[in-house]
């Protein structure tokens, strides 16, 4: 299972090992379980309070689960994804933006850096 490094300019970086079965949990749930203070509000992908910047640290290159429809809507509203990136994502099934909603992002088997 992957390592997730949570990084913030005001908190010490924290790396957690995602345990077996965590590939069904959101990054927000993993953060909360490990006392990482990512801001959140609705936990339903509608408010953008939990928006994070995600980078892949493993060599596999994929970036967690695909964007949900809610994420696409919120990221467009906040100008974090363009129509061209959305179209490219739908064609090649790869996320084309580092911005994600922690409450919607489902972990896969890659090491991630999550900046909040």
Image (tube, rainbow, N blue to C red):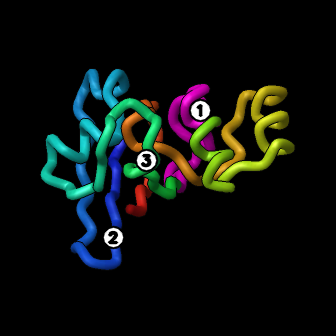
Q: Position of residue 81 (x, y in %)?
A: 70, 49
Q: Nearer the viewer, residue 2 or 93?
A: 93
Is residue 78 among the parts visible in the rendering? yes
- Determine whether the residue tagged by mark 3 lies in a helix, strand or loop: loop
Structural crowding at the residue carrying mark 3, measured as other residues with C-alpha within 10 Å and reported as few (<14), some (14–19) or many (≥20): many
Relative side of 4 to 58, left or right: left
Q: Which mark is residue 67?
A: 1
Q: Is residue 57 magenta?
A: yes
Residue range corresponding to the magenta coloring: 55-72
Residue position for label 2: 8
**Residue 19 forms part of the magenta stretch:** no
Q: Which comes before the other along the chain, label 1 or label 3?
A: 1
Q: Which picture quadrant has residue 38?
A: bottom left
Give the residue displayed 78% in from the left and 27% down from the top.
90
Which residue shows up at 46% across the image and 36% down it?
46
Disc 1 from disc 3: Cα separation: 18 Å
Q: Are marks 1 and 3 in contact (CB under 8 Å)?
A: no
Query: Which residue matches tag 3?
Result: 111
Could you tell whether 55 is left or right of 94 in the image? left
- At label 2, counting other C-alpha atoms closer than 10 Å, the crowd grade (few under 14, some 14-19, many 20 or more) is some
**Residue 116: image x %, image y %?**
38, 62
Q: Which mark is residue 1?
A: none
Q: CA distance from mark 3 to mark 2?
A: 17 Å
Q: Compare marks 3 and 2 and give the one earlier in the sequence.
A: 2
**Gap in angstroms between the C-alphas marked 2 and 1:** 23 Å
Q: Where the N terminus falls, by quadrant?
A: top left
What type of secondary structure mainly makes up the magenta span? loop
């Amino acid at each position: 299972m992957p390592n997730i490094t949570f990084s913030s300019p005001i908190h010490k970086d924290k790396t957690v090992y995602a345990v077996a079965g965590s590939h069904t949990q959101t990054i927000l749930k993993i953060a909360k379980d490990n006392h990482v203070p990512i801001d959140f509000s609705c936990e339903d992908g509608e408010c953008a309070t939990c928006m994070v910047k995600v980078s892949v640290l493993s060599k596999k290159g994929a970036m967690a689960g695909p964007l949900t429809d809610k994420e696409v809507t919120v990221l467009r509203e906040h100008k974090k994804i363009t129509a061209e990136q959305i179209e490219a994502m739908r064609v090649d099934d790869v996320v084309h933006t580092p911005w994600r909603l922690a409450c919607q992002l489902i972990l896969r088997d890659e090491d991630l850096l999550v900046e909040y």
